[in-house]
Every structure is written in C-alpha cells, then in structure tokens.
Amino acid sequence: MQLLSQITSLLFINPQPLSIKALAKILEVSSQEVEEALVELIKKYNTDKTLGLQILRQEDKVQMVTAADNSKIISKFINEELSGDLTLPQLETLAIIAYRGPLPKLDIDTIRGVNCSIILRNLIVRGLIEESINSKKNESFYTITLDFLRLLGISSIKELPEYERLNTLTI
C-alpha cells in the first residue's frame, strides 16, 4: 500500500508526465512493481468518478490530471486565478527565480522553506516563468519568461534593481 501512496503523491505534485523508469528509480523499486501499482491506481482513479482525478497513460509515461467532468469549474477557477493579483508567496517565488534562476525546484523549495509546486504551476500558467528539463539530471529548472520582462518594461533581467549583487549573493 505504501508504494501506491508514494506513486499517487509523486503523480499529484508533478505537473509533467513521469516515466515508469523514473518512478522506479525515485522509489527504488523495479519497473515491474511500478507497472503493477499503476494498473491498480489507474483502475481506481479512472473508474471512481467521485475522486475528481484520473491517471493518463501513454506508452511508458503517466500523469495525474483533473477529471474531464470538472473542466467547467476548473476553467472558472483558473480564469479567476489568472485575472487576480499575485499572492505574496507567488511574488516571493517569482523574485527568487528572477534573481537566482535558472533554479531547480528543490532549490526554490529550500529557499522558501515550503513545497512550491502549486505556485510554480500557477506562474507557468500565467506565462511568467517556464520550465525546462535537464534529462541528464532528471530535474526541472525554472527561469523567467520574455513576458515577465515585457510586463516589467525591461529588456534584460540584469535591469532588475540590485540584480548583480543579489544574483551573486550566497545563501
């Protein structure tokens, strides 16, 4: 049961699909064990419509997503989120990425002291940051976007106040 719980948690927090091989490596189990657990999880999430989530699978990649039946309410929520002001945690995360990026998620979480998955997803949806994946390290890195620069009215990240000092500051 612990393996099912762990896979569910990893799929829930990761905005990108995960390969079975990556899950096996992270969980330190065989790919076969992950395969068997996924069969059970897919059956559970894709048949129980009360959960509001489902698991998509394409070849060796899997991802947890919201149920299609909830698309209207999800769209309403996202539109409200996108039209509202940034929250203080979102601004803090954005500043960390702007001054210190590109940064892996783990570093952002460490600097802020909390899991920033939802904040990062929101900033990506708003077009303020982008994610790139380093396949060698199997790690996501976050950087600011050109839209972020445009919204601030600057042409380079180096135009941010005290950029040179804060960018080289050691933590």
Image (cartoon, rainbow, N blue to C red):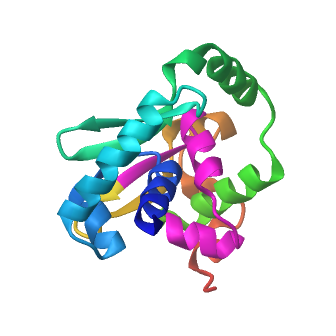
- Work out whether 8 lies above or below 33: above
For the record, the magenta segment spans 105-132
- Work out whether 137 lies above or below 87: below
Q: Main secondary structure of the magenta part?
A: helix
Residue furthest to the top = 72
The residue sitting at 55% across, 16% down in the picture is 69
- Work out whether 143 lies above or below 81: below
Q: Can residue 17 be seen in this view?
A: no
Quarter that holds the C terminus: bottom right
User: Measured from the top left, where is residue 160 in percent x and y?
Assistant: 66, 56
Quarter that holds the N terminus: bottom left
Q: Can residue 61 be seen in this view?
A: yes
- Work out whether 165 lies above or below 8: below
| Left or right: 106 as drawn, with respect to 137 | right
Q: Is 39 included in the stretch rendered in magenta?
A: no
User: Measured from the top left, where is residue 132 in percent x and y?
Assistant: 37, 52
The residue sitting at 58% across, 34% down in the picture is 51
User: Measured from the top left, where is residue 124 in percent x and y?
Assistant: 54, 40
What count of labels does the image hold? Answer: 0
Residue 161 quadrant: bottom right
User: Measured from the top left, where is residue 96 in percent x and y?
Assistant: 64, 63
Residue furthest to the bottom = 170
| Left or right: 61 as drawn, with respect to 73 | left
| Left or right: 151 as drawn, with respect to 23 | right
The residue sitting at 20% across, 63% down in the picture is 31
Residue 113 quadrant: bottom right
Q: Is 110 included in the stretch rendered in magenta?
A: yes
The residue sitting at 50% across, 39% down in the picture is 146
